[in-house]
Image: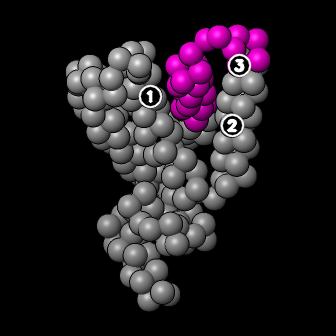
Amino acid sequence: MQQLERLVYSQQQHNGGPLSCLSPPFLQKRDSVLPLWSDEKTQKYHQRFLWQMMALNLICSILPFLGILALSGVITSFYGNSFADLRVVINVYAFATIPMCLTSVLQADLLAKGHNWMLFILRTIRDVVIVVTAYLLFSTQPEQSTALNLSLINVVAYSLSAITLFVFFYNAQPTR
């Protein structure tokens, strides 16, 4: 295991940039990754790499969303007439994958940089918001569509989580 870690570490130094987003989690140790981000050139490389990963994840989540959006009528027809409102729920949950994918890239970067507690706090806040909102919504309006409400709550919670992470990363960028 240590030989593999040394190999990745030497490759990172040789290539002039961190490969932390591509490395398995057991190789993303704080003491081996952080020294690589110490100079300005490497930080700029890392930021560019992070935004490229975000763009790739955005494309890879929008394409299936559009496919599901186009085929949601066919998908719901397999379930019969009793699931008439399922089409909207499927579309909302398919849309929810977009902020989920974007946050996963930012969360992986937080873990690679050793911000475990920050990620724990952000995820806890997100999950508490989901549970409290679901409880309040379902206790005050039980006649509403439960699946649709839960899917909307997830979209809002993950979107807020993505916005919070974007703000955190924007403020954490070094001054130019």
Tell me the amino acid under the disc marked 3. Answer: Phe
> Looking at numbered disc 1 in the image, what kind of residue is underneath it?
Tyr
Where does label 3 land, which residue? 138
Tell me residue 173's x, y (percent): 55, 39
Q: Which of the two discs, 2 and 3, sits closer to the camera? A: 3
Q: Which corner quadrant of the image does residue 85 belong to?
A: top left
Contact check, label 2 and label 3, Cβ < 8 Å: no
Do the numbered discs 1 and 2 sit on residues whose CB atoms are within 8 Å?
no
Residue 59 in view of the camera: no
Question: How is the structure coloured here?
Answer: one colour
* Mark in the foreground, 1 or 2: 1
Q: Residue 133 in magenta?
A: no
Q: Quadrant of residue 93?
A: top left
Crowd band around label 1 with a 10 angstrom C-alpha radius: few (<14), some (14–19), many (20+) = some
Q: Which residue is mark 2?
A: 127
Q: Count neighbours of disc 2 (C-alpha within 10 A) and say few if under 14, some if 14 to 19, many if 20 or more.
A: some
Q: Are marks 1 and 3 in contact (CB under 8 Å)?
A: no
Label 2 – label 3 distance at C-alpha: 16 Å
Q: Position of residue 119 (x, y in %)?
A: 66, 47
Amino acid type, residue under disc 2 in the picture: Asp
